[in-house]
Amino acid sequence: MNKHSSEKFEQSSWIPTFLLATAIISTSVLIYVWLSPFKYSPLPLKETAKRLQEVEWYRVSFDDNSNWIFRALIVVPAAFCFGGAVDYGRRSRWFLMLAAPLILLFLAAVVLGLELCKVWFIPRVVSQNNVYAGWCGAVFGLLFWGLLGNGCLSFVSRRFGASDRDAGE
């Protein structure tokens, strides 16, 4: 490792950790928001499984779009930050492309698990639309990182007086 790459690593090694911590916090906020308000009234496991099989798609009208968009948007920051945590400072996007399916699978499992919890914690409105919106949010979050992530970090580092080397460039 030459002197320049060692210096770059020392200066920017906190950024992937920060992005990972932000992704974990974003996922925690996602869980809180998805499940609130908390009205714990569990169903028996057999009844939960039966209701989960009966979850339907709802017709989304123009007035109902806000809930669908909200469900997608609350997943975007977690996906964006997970993408940044694995991709930051790399010259090639191959690692991000290899990690993206794992990130999407993880966030899809979180969203699906949250919908299952909503089936279990009655009374809740459960919809496959919520699952689909969450999955779309995960895809958009990763796409936003791929298109805008390093540029955003460059902007922030310039704004707060850090050098371009701290922004992964």
Image (spheres, grey):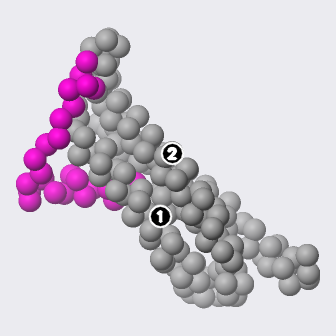
Quadrant of the image containing the N terminus: bottom right
Residue that badge 2 annotates: 106
Task: State the CA–CA distance, disc 1 to disc 2.
Answer: 13 Å
Lateral position of residue 26 relative to residue 124, left or right: right
Q: Is residue 141 above or below residue 164?
A: above
**Mark 2: which secondary structure?**
helix
On the image, the x and y values in percent for residue 7 come to 85, 79
Q: Is residue 146 magenta?
A: no
Name the image quarter holding residue 156. Answer: bottom right
**Dot 1: within a 10 Å radius of its alpha carbon, few (fewer than 14), some, or many (20 or more) residues?**
many
At x 68%, y 60%, the residue is 17
Q: Main secondary structure of the magenta part?
A: helix
On the image, the x and y values in percent for residue 146 come to 51, 72
On the image, the x and y values in percent for residue 6 come to 87, 76
Residue that badge 1 annotates: 142
At x 52%, y 79%, the residue is 152
Q: Is residue 38 visible?
A: no
Q: Amino acid at mark 2?
A: Phe
On the image, the x and y values in percent for residue 86 come to 63, 62
Quadrant of the image containing the C terminus: bottom right
Give the residues drawn in magenta, as a range. 50-75
At x 75%, y 68%, the residue is 13
Q: Amino acid at mark 1?
A: Leu
Lateral position of residue 39 relative to residue 98, left or right: left
